[in-house]
Image: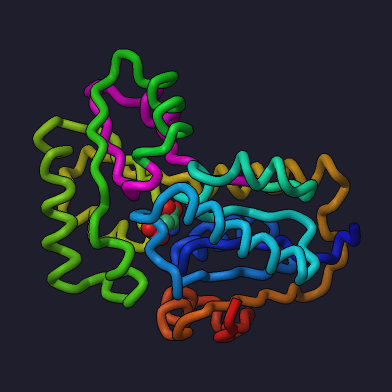
Amino acid sequence: MDKNNPIGVFDSGVGGSSIWQEIHKLLPLENVIYLADSKNAPYGNKSPEEITALSIKNVEKLLELGCKIIVVACNTATTNAISTLRENYEIPIIGIEPAIKPAALQTTSKSIGILATKGTLSSALFSKTTREFTKDIHVVEIIGEGLVPLIEAGKLDSPEMISLLKKHTKPMIDADVDYLVLGCSHYPYIIPQLKKILPKNVKIIDSGEAVARQTKTVLQSLNLLREENAIPNLQFFTNAETDTLKFLLKDYAEKISVTKQDF
Ligand code: DGL
């Protein structure tokens, strides 16, 4: 495998680009191909079988494009499909899971909130991690119903978004949580909106940085980090309209290409 081959990243839509931003911060020389499967978003309400089939489709596409490693930048796809993906493909595959462990270790109120999709919260992998790390901690699990479609539509500041966030965070605030774990890669894009609603003492954490660090560790161990000091090729493909991806990545407009393509 060539070190110049791209890192492949996929998500059910635009959300995983928040994870790409962390990867790019840590590994600025790496070539990247990102697939936003927005045509099939949200994955969160689909069955494990459907999520697995869509994940396989995305991996096949990234393999066809010559990726050297795959980052599943979607909690729902990771918690439902990563073991099948790892059984079926030899390429290294990095996943993302809600950051329950750091929240459980740092909470002082012994109460934490988790906002994620139905698919993530009902997965066996999520239950296992939660059981393991939150024995003496109260965990408020909330399905972020309706949030992903609004983020896909770029409606981050809309009245619908604000009222949904108020509804979803109320049980957490009532339970005196001091950590809110963002268990969906779309949600980092609504941190400013969440901050306006949550009490000041509530810390919001997500897994983007951890995924970037893990990606670097694995590439390093395989001697696959790109060394060439040349401008990286950063290609974003979506199978829906390009507007939201372009809007969310406007700070990178000069560096990236965003293309609509069926996959
Ligand atoms: N961004 C995804 C996640 O991290 C899934 C959102 C969805 O498609 O429901 O869970």
The quarter of the image that holds ligand 1 is bottom left
Q: How many marks?
A: 0
Lateral position of residue 157 relative to residue 2, left or right = left
Q: Read off the magenta span.
A: 94-120
Image coordinates for residue 103, horizontal then vertical, percent: 37, 31
Lateral position of residue 85 relative to residue 221, left or right = left
Quarter in which the N terminus is drawn = bottom right
In the figure, residue 218 lies in which quadrant? top right
Image coordinates for residue 198, horizontal then vertical, percent: 18, 47
Q: Residue at x 58, y 70 (%)?
A: 35
Judging depth in this view, the residue of 101 and 50 nearest the camera is 50
- Of all residues, the one furthest to the front in this rendering is 49
Q: Residue at x 62, y 80 (%)?
A: 256
Lateral position of residue 111 relative to residue 29, left or right = left
Q: Residue at x 27, y 61 (%)?
A: 147
Judging depth in this view, the residue of 145 and 254 nearest the camera is 145
Image coordinates for residue 181, horizontal then vertical, percent: 35, 41
Judging depth in this view, the residue of 92 and 188 nearest the camera is 92
